[in-house]
Amino acid sequence: MENASDSSFDITKFSSYSEVQGQYTDSFIKGSRCVKISEDAESVVVAVSSSYRDRNGIVEKVHWPKKVDFAVVGDSDFAEFIGNFVEKQSIDGVSSVKHDGEFRLEDINSGAPVVNIINAICLEAIRRSASDIHIQTSRSGIAVRLRMDGVLHTVRRLDRSVSDNLVSRIKVMSGLNVMENRLCQDGRMSVNAGGRSLDFRVSVVPAVDGQNIVLRLFNDCSKELSLEQLGFSDEKLAAMASALGLPFGLILVTGPTGSGKTTTLHAMLEKMDIEHLKVVTIEDPVEKVMDGIEQIQVNDEIGLTFSSVLRRILRQDPDVIMVGEIRDAETAELAVRSALTGHLILSTLHTNDCVSAIARLEDLGVEPYMVAGVLRTSIAQRLVRKVCPFCGGSGCGECGSTGYKGRTAVSEILMVDDAISNMIERRAPDSEIRSYLRERGFSSLREDAASKVEMGISTKEELVREGLA
């Protein structure tokens, strides 16, 4: 192939491809991975998928004697273009291409449009750094929504006739029962996009107008973040480092669902000396595979619960144990007793602030004297969107015209000293503990959030949206 060169041409936005003079047929585009960008009296510009760049001599022959310039685009981008713009709404067949347990998103099957549509949805979600894909069916059609930086955005609508084949295809990829349409089903699917192996957690729920699907992307190594990158201040980073250096005790990260608790725990584990410490995690699911750490995924259906695994893992001589969530009395008691017997335990709780974690443990049946004896640090956090660095908040192509790109942590940290330990043991009210903390320069969630606005990192509107203003 001559005149081939890399290009900045964004094929994922080439919705007007059919308006190009003498455009190739859709079947040729899918089969050859080529699409005409433009043509004049002397030359033709053709976009070609990178893995097909050396297979399209026929294109030059077709256009001879005109000069053909090839704009080489990524396989994933070309697959997304086909799924978004080339495929029609008539859906037939659910054939699949599978490689070693993974479905390759770049593989285009011209006989199965539904495959290409799903591929395009997944690829767009990956490209736009979405955490979740929502496929919602209603009487008027199907809405595809992506959760980006914590906010849902509708990115496309599909005809309702697509629904059955779309759901069936996703069930096939997830190993779910295709014939069961009355019950909720959970599964997972692995896909390969651009040479990266990605995992999606799949949830299918029957609703009045059809089956709704949520795909959550996890174990995405491209999103690896250190504690320093999460948005914690130097003072709070120093406090966390001090807690992580303790030989035993309980460290909690608290906040509502979606506040980044698990990400913070994983970033903490990255600070561990795994060469000399045995670190074990118990998670549901394992959201990020980490080298040098033993990771266990719970499975309630077979009795592999947080509490049952924690009880047995203590026989494996661990130094550090991360429990994905303390969600019941048995897990809470085991976690506290494990901390009392010389282990460093990291876990999460669903509470609104760091001080409330004390009362939550007591609500789960842990005696105050035991909480006082093991709790070392309680971190409460939220995530707020950051002002887009490319446009300063006005909206641009990089941020999808939202004015925001990425998120940062807003946090508060309770470091348990002897005075606080005594207050916990004698069941002092939260107000007394907070008063003690304020006297010592404690920075609350709202104060930390306000500082992010003052530094131009986030906005007042974003704090209002998150209930932090």
Image (cartoon, grey):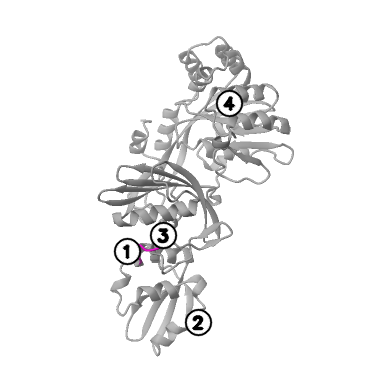
User: Looking at the image, is mark 4 or mark 3 earlier in the sequence?
Assistant: 3
Q: Which residues are magenta?
A: 87-93
Which of pointers 1 and 4 lies earlier in the amino acid sequence? 1
Kind of residue indicated by mark 1: Ser
Q: Amino acid at mark 2?
A: Met
> How far apart are labels 1 and 4 at the CA level?
50 Å
Give the mark, 2 or 4, whose residue is nearer the N terminus: 2
Q: Residues within 10 Å of mark 2 (few under 14, many from 20)?
A: some
Q: Nearer the viewer, residue 446 or 91?
A: 91
Would you say the residues marked 2 and 3 are in contact, meaning their CB atoms lie under 8 Å apart? no
User: In the figure, is residue 187 to the left or right of 90?
Assistant: right
Instruction: Give residue 1's mark.
Output: 2
Q: Which residue is under mark 3?
A: 120
Instruction: State the CA–CA distance, disc 4 to disc 3.
Output: 41 Å
In the picture of the structure, the residue carrying the numbered disc 4 is: 331
Residue nearest the observer in this picture, 229 or 284 = 284
> Residue 315: x percent and y percent?
72, 30
Tell whether position 307 is magenta. Answer: no
Check disc 1 and report its element: helix, strand or loop.
loop
- Tell me which label, 3 or 1, sits earlier in the chain: 1
Would you call the spot at circle 1 few (<14 residues within 10 Å), some (14-19), or many (20 or more)? few
Task: List the single residue furthest toward the left.
Answer: 140
Residue position for label 1: 90
Question: What residue do we see at 53% from left, 25% from top?
Answer: 328
> Quadrant where the C terminus lies?
top left
Lower sequence index among marks 2 and 1:
2
